[in-house]
Amino acid sequence: SRKPAPVHLLHGTADAVVPPSVAQKLYSRLARGTAHITLLEGGDHRLSRASDVCALLDAVAFRRAAAYRAAAAMLPRMSLALFASSP
């Protein structure tokens, strides 16, 4: 079985194009533990305020750091597998 990919939804509460309830409904259908939602108070559809952009960049940095940690944790196992398969 495949592990669900992590998902982080960011949605402005003042979005007049797509209501925040759409993000909340999507979040409720995603796998627990791999999905996160952040509702940005007063954020519009384009998340155009500086604080919205900062929240977006923080979310990306958090996910990138988590991916690096996961990759680093795999390195010792990968190294052992490479040496074990050498002639």
Image (cartoon, rainbow, N blue to C red):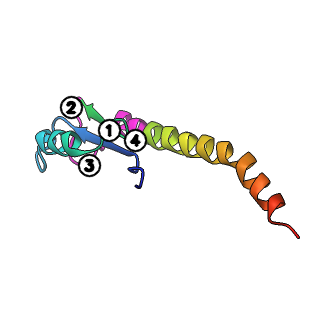
Would you name the residue on which mark 2 appears? Answer: 42
**Is 46 colored magenta in this rendering?**
yes
Q: Earlier in the sequence, mark 3 or mark 4?
A: 3
Query: From the viewer's perspective, is the residue at label 2 or at label 1 nearer?
Result: 2
Q: Residue furthest right?
A: 87
- Spatial separation of the CA atoms under disc 3 and disc 2: 11 Å
Residue 46: which disc? 3
Q: Nearer the viewer, residue 55 or 6?
A: 6
Residues under numbered marks 4 and 1 in contact, where contact means CB atoms less than 8 Å apart: no
Report, in whole angstroms, how far the alpha carbon at label 2 lies from the one at label 4. 15 Å
Q: CA distance from mark 3 to mark 1?
A: 9 Å
Reading the image, the residue beneath label 1 is 49
State the extent of the magenta-drawn residues as a range: 41-55
Please state the horizontal and vertical placement of residue 44, each as a whole percent of the image.
21, 42
Amino acid on which disc 4 is placed? Leu
Amino acid at dot 3: Arg
Q: Earlier in the sequence, mark 2 or mark 1?
A: 2
- Amino acid type at circle 2 is Gly
Q: CA distance from mark 3 to mark 4?
A: 11 Å
**In the displayed structure image, the side of residue 56 where residue 17 appears, left or right:** left
Instruction: Work out which residue is located at the far bottom of the displayed protein and give it.
Output: 87
- Residue 26 belongs to magenta span: no
Q: Are marks 2 and 1 in contact (CB under 8 Å)?
A: yes
